[in-house]
């Protein structure tokens, strides 16, 4: 009886990963636009007055709210709030694999075409400093470069060392993360945006 019930439970839809239910979940849109008859990827420069990551280059997107029916709905809502794009004019092309930055942070990226003319005249100046585009042809030819960032665990002062083997001498593993960079004209695309962009370009190739 127990095994049958367990099998039924395990065959139901499972979270994407352990901890997804409590993770910070966000969704972004990789916007494809036509500029002079050529396909480009559009990026935002976050407003310099923003509290978090002012001046960073990003895709439109943000936190998935409890009222959003799906991650894609969240990406559409955020794109509308940031760029002023009418959600009914967005043409979804597909979805990339979720990017799991950590057990507490996951990003759902989507690819869609949008009308560049809408954005030029309607983006939200309070959240977006400017927008710019990069030709896909340029991205296909460009070789991004990488630097490593190391993270060393620091236990809290009340960590119960007495409960683990080797106590305070426990050998914590240092985590190394790749940070990729794309330099285009005066812009440097890096961080989360660069990692998603790199994956997207590798799929096209």
Image (cartoon, helix red, strand yellow):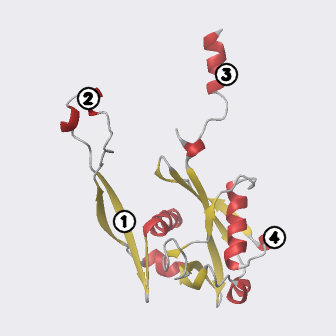
Earlier in the chain: of badge 2 and badge 1, it is: 2
Q: Is residue 104 above or below residue 113?
A: above
The one nearer the camera, 123 or 93, is 123
Give the numbered dot on residue 162.
2
Disc 4 to disc 3, how far (Cα)?
A: 39 Å
Earlier in the chain: of badge 2 and badge 4, it is: 4
The one nearer the camera, 26 or 66, is 66
Q: Position of residue 30 (x, y in %)?
A: 60, 69
Instruction: Report the quarter where the N terminus lies.
Output: top right
Circles 2, 4 touching at the beta carbon (< 8 Å): no
Q: Is residue 49 above or below residue 4?
A: below
Query: From the viewer's perspective, is 141 left or right of 177?
Result: right
Mark 2 or 4: in front is: 2
Earlier in the chain: of badge 3 and badge 2, it is: 3
Local crowd at mark 1 within 10 Å, few (<14), some, or many (≥20)? Answer: some
Mark 3 lies on a secondary structure that is: helix
**Residue that badge 4 annotates:** 88
Earlier in the chain: of badge 1 and badge 4, it is: 4
Question: Which residue: 54% across, 53% down?
Answer: 106
Question: Which residue: 69% across, 61% down?
Answer: 74
Q: Position of residue 36 (x, y in %)?
A: 64, 91
Mark 4 lies on a secondary structure that is: helix
Local crowd at mark 4 within 10 Å, few (<14), some, or many (≥20)? Answer: few
Give the numbered dot on residue 8.
3
Mark 2 lies on a secondary structure that is: helix
Give the numbered dot on residue 134.
none
**Residue that badge 1 annotates:** 179
Circles 3, 2 touching at the beta carbon (< 8 Å): no
Disc 2 to disc 1, how far (Cα)?
A: 36 Å
The one nearer the camera, 5 or 204, is 5
Query: From the viewer's perspective, is 85 left or right of 54?
Result: right
Local crowd at mark 2 within 10 Å, few (<14), some, or many (≥20)? Answer: few
């Amino acid at each position: 009886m127990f095994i049958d019930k367990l099998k039924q439970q395990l065959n139901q839809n499972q979270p994407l990963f352990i901890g997804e239910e409590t993770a910070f979940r966000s969704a972004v849109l990789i916007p494809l636009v036509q500029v002079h008859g050529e396909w480009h990827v559009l990026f935002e420069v976050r407003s310099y007055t923003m509290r978090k990551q002012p001046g960073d280059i990003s895709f439109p997107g943000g936190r998935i709210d409890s009222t959003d029916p799906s991650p894609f709905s969240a990406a559409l809502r955020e794109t509308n709030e940031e760029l002023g794009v009418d959600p009914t004019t967005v043409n979804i092309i597909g979805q990339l694999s979720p990017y799991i930055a950590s057990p507490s942070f996951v990003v759902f990226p989507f690819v869609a075409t949008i009308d560049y003319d809408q954005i030029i005249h309607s983006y939200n100046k309070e959240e977006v400093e400017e927008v710019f585009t990069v030709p896909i042809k340029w991205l296909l030819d460009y070789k991004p470069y990488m630097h490593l960032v190391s993270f060393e665990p620091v236990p809290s002062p009340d960590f119960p060392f007495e409960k683990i083997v080797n106590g305070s001498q426990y050998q914590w593993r240092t985590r190394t993360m790749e940070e990729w960079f794309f330099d285009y004209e005066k812009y440097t695309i890096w961080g989360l945006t660069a990692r998603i962009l790199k994956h997207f370009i590798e799929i096209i190739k």
